[in-house]
Amino acid sequence: MAISEPVVVPQSGAADRLARTWAQPRGFWGWFQNVHHTAIGVRFMVTSFIFFLLGGVLAAMMRWQLVRPEHNAIGPDLYNQLFTVHGSTMIFLFAVPMMFQGFGVYVVPHMCGTRNIAFPRLNAFSYYIYVVGALLLWVGLFLKTGADAGWFAYVPLSGPEFTPGKRSDFWAQMITFTEVSALGVAICITTTILRYRAPGMTLNRMPILLWEKLVTSIMVIFAMPSVMVVSSMLLMDRTINTQFFNPSVGGDVLLYQHLFWFFGHPEVYIIFLPATAIVSTVVAVFARRHIFGYVPIVTSVVATGFLGFSVWVHHMFATGLPQMSASFFTAASLMIVIPTAVQFYCWMATIWHGRLQLKLPMLWIFGFFFVFLIGGLSGVMLASVPLDWQVHDTFFVVAHFHYVLIGGALFPMFGGMYFWIPKITGRMMNDRLGKIHFWLFFVGFNLTFFTMHFLGLHGMPRRVYTYTPEMRWGALNLLATIGVVFMTAGILVFIANFFQSKATGRFAGPNPWGAGSLEWATPSPPPHYNFLELPTVNGREALWEAEPNQPIVGGVREDIPEVLVTNTLDSEPEYRDELPGPSIWPFLTAIAVSIAFIWSIFSPWGIAYGAIPVVITLIGWLWPRGHSPSPRVPEPALEARWIR
Amino acid sequence: MRNRVSIAMTILLLLSITSCKREERQLRPDPNASQTLNTVQVSGLNPGANSISSPPPAGQYEESAYAVSQGKTLYNQYNCVGCHANGGGGIGPPLMDNNWIYGSEPGNVFATIMQGRPNGMPSFRNRIPEYQAWEIAAYVRSMSGLLPKDVAPSRSDQLYVKPAEQSMPYQAPAGVTGEPEEKK
Amino acid sequence: MIGFSRVPLLAAGVFASYPGDHSILHPAGPQASNIEWLYWVIFWIVFVVYVVVVLGFMRAGARTYTSADEMLPIMKDEAGDRRASWAVGSAITITVLTLFAVLVMSEITGKKVEGETSKNPVTIQVIGHQWWWEVIYPDPQADQTVTTANEIHVPVGKRVVILTNSADVIHSFWAPSINGKRDLLPGYSSAFWLQIDQPGVYHGQCAEFCGLQHAHMGFSIVAEREDAFSQWKAQQLKPAQDPTELVTVHGRDVFLSHACVMCHTIRGTDAGSRLGPDLTHIASRQMIAAETLPNTPGALAGWIVDPQRIKPGNRMSPNPLQPDDLQALITYLQTLK
């Protein structure tokens, strides 16, 4: 069927009015007052990408140290900080902020057909809090206070006796910052998806990406508190002499592991589910058809969300668990393969019974298929307890999680970037450079991480800063280090491509890929008001099933920042809500909260005294705004209604 | 936008040049510092004697949380707890109060460990390397709250016998006569 | 795809050049053998799955319309979708059954591995320290208890139980050719069974990050015939011989008058500290410094004088001894067989 172009009924001056209403302030201080989701989303994505590059530099340094036996380039203290900050950066400062926060904040309101995200100031606050947390970890690294107990910082090693100084405290507070940030964004996204969808977008017609963001947000809400609790307990053990993890007085070191991994496993699904949503979206577009198996895929996404919370003990199989426990978690870990397998088969069916146009984003999706599958299957091996007893904490596990995280998140991320960057910047990216990027990265990645499977099988444990020549791991380590060169080259090509395209790329237009979801109904880049006319939806792919006279929403005011709030299940219009405009309070509150948290690293009084500025800024933030005065028109004309 | 990024980069670079003294870890001590003293020492061995001026090494140990934490570990491992308990004393005098018979400066405490003292304090010369003695001296001073709170060690993973040194109140050294000396 | 085709080449090269005394794929006892069996079974299952799925994607993407620059019109294929429903349904069913099979095999292997217990095992207590292994062969009679470090001797063919504990942080006891790993957790003690069927020396390494020298925390398990094992144990029970020659007497005096005595035990002398490894029979071990250096005079001298150069951050202080003292000390230590 032909894609309907959005029918724009030109109203005189509507675009200007909306632009004025939704304009965000400019200038240095204006930057800190911006509450529009596109700006905040772009900031998340850019900042997290910068941290991705920094984390990659650390990884390159690690691989350089391991290139040959007894290499003395980097000593043990620095190496411990390198792998800890690398892991923490990639997980906390890149994967979640990019895949879930940045991308979600940018695309969800567009896909819902609304003008801004719910709770825009909370959204902005989340960004500033994330930046402070990220800087905390990295400034620590530069000041020799880098966290050095591993990205999961097991006690007692990260505890008060075995990590002197403030290293683990910086790590623990970085967790607090980033998890508060993730929770804030989760709340915004959940509310947007449940209440701000365009009329006609019932739950049954919601794009898979919105389903995924909803499930991921709820996972965040349930998982993040666990890690905040455990990092706070660690912090308290270290600063105010609590005894949570002190075995000699009744504390328990395994408690830390349970609480951490109860968060830690859902965390990797929080990273992976956004990637599957990108895949579902991109596959449908480039197979030129509706995704096969919408209901099975949505069910799989929801099932993964639930099952993700039931497998955490598989990170602890080597601790001497009771057999019943090991069996249960093996079964659960194998069971969670099933939803992902369902999605794989549905994607395959979509491509098989579609008309595949293998453009650049789709190339990355194929990369995802080939790479993630290896990771997923090595995960099946790890789920089996006896095998895990052998390969746990070896380079086999390092290979596995890099295959699932890079294959499962990074490949779809790059595919999504080539797919959505034309929307964000308005210009297409260079195709040839994109293909060079893909092949360099694919080759380098496999060279580095496939060899690590063998290293693990031959006995090389994780987190070792060197190894003796007798182990004979040198050749494989050399191969793994060579792969880094290719990956780096690929990423540099990508960065060059991005900047070049931004300046001189072909103009993209509103819908260069002929896609079906609502974000492609806006100009590229979208204006601050997102949609000139708020759309309605007839089917699962809004633009593919739009009729020539597709109704639009009328009655939402254009002189104040107002959105339409709809019913959760059926997306019937309920009422209109005025959103707050630009505000400095999120930034000020973030500063106050940061002062309190960072002060508490050095003194418990930081929480007490630091609460005062927080209260003051919260008062400023929450001061009642009142409602904008109604214009002098009769009431019925102001009701939101469908124009037929 | 570019200005912001370059400002941030400059700050990060500057920070990389400085570093936090608290987090300095000297894993491989200066070979001289691991000498065990071989010469006979003569000192003015009376209570309240002139303090031995703290030579520079003391500073680097007292400012490094790692060194003080090592001192705490060594205090337990070398059985200082046998006579001094965890600071409360027993056979030996308490170390967490503000009475310092032989002076409270790092050099004093170091000399006490190395030379021994009347009424039962052994001499650890030739047994404990110098750098470790400095670390133990730094730890002993932390027991009276004489070290900054962020450098003093936290609780250990053992039975909870006393508050951690980072919670100790500052006790101005009083000397054996019980009168506070001038805070130096 | 490129990454995929590297596998056979690498596999051939790798498996050809690494003989096994520390590899999961070269087991030397029943536990590791069972796990190796499970590995290969699951490996072939996932290999077949991978090949099938990859072929599926390649077939699915075989016909591509790359030449078209414009995006093609949206299409529907309802007949194809009906066929696909059956295919996907079958695939899901096969997946579930395969996973169930993997689960059953894991359970069976797990039971076999954990079931290798005995009423009369050789009992060994392993206590993890930063960054060495304290090894104790407990006995109801205190004077029959062997205490050593880093090198574990076991009789071939007999069941051995390791009772784990840790003196500080979490470590992990792992000898890949023998069995999986078991974490040494402070505050917990667990029983970890192993059995070695072929005599030899098997390397192990700490497998849970434990601080600065986690990389250099190795151990070895020496599996020998029953009589050799008893001989070894009897020898370990003896206190150190009194030195008789001038140089070894001098060496012992150096040991007792320097920092060594603060941390190490040599039974038969006054040195009785339990902080560091027991040195009563140090000359009987093949390697020193937790399997980091060979037990040769040169390495021993280097280790004693500057351990921080070799394992920066470990708990042994440098000992800049006079050359004669060092020489005498080494000679004395080499008599402690």
Image (tube, coloured by chain):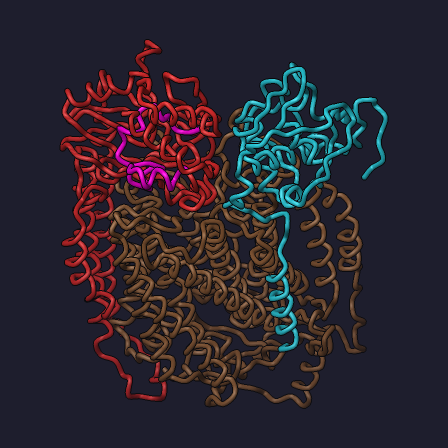
Chain colours: A brown, B cyan, C red
| Along the viewing direction, whichever of A417 and C221 lies nearer the viewer | C221
* Residue C125 visible to the viewer: no
- All told, the count of numbered labels is 0
Q: Residue A17 falls in which quadrant of the image?
A: bottom right
Q: Is C278 in the magenta?
A: yes
Q: Position of residue A641 (x, y in %)?
A: 62, 73
Relative vertical location of residue A116 with respect to residue C37 in this rendering, above or below: below
* Residue C233 visible to the viewer: yes
- Classify the position of the C terminus of chain A by image quarter: bottom right
Q: Residue B164 falls in which quadrant of the image?
A: top right
- Classify the position of the N terminus of chain A by image quarter: bottom left
Q: Position of residue C199 (x, y in %)?
A: 15, 32
| Along the viewing direction, whichever of C164 and B17 lies nearer the viewer | B17
| Along the viewing direction, whichever of C277 and A615 lies nearer the viewer | C277
Q: Which residue sits furthest top?
A: C141
Q: Is A571 in the magenta?
A: no
Q: Position of residue A148 (x, y in %)?
A: 51, 48
Q: Position of residue A280 (x, y in %)?
A: 38, 67
Relative vertical location of residue C206 with respect to residue A294 in this rendering, above or below: above
Q: Residue at position x 16%, y 42% from top?
A: C37
Q: Residue at position x 74%, y 29% from top?
A: B103
Image side of residue B84 versus residue A197, left or right: right
Relative vertical location of residue A358 with respect to residue C49 in this rendering, above or below: below
| Along the viewing direction, whichever of A157 and A578 lies nearer the viewer | A157
Residues shaded magenta: C275-304
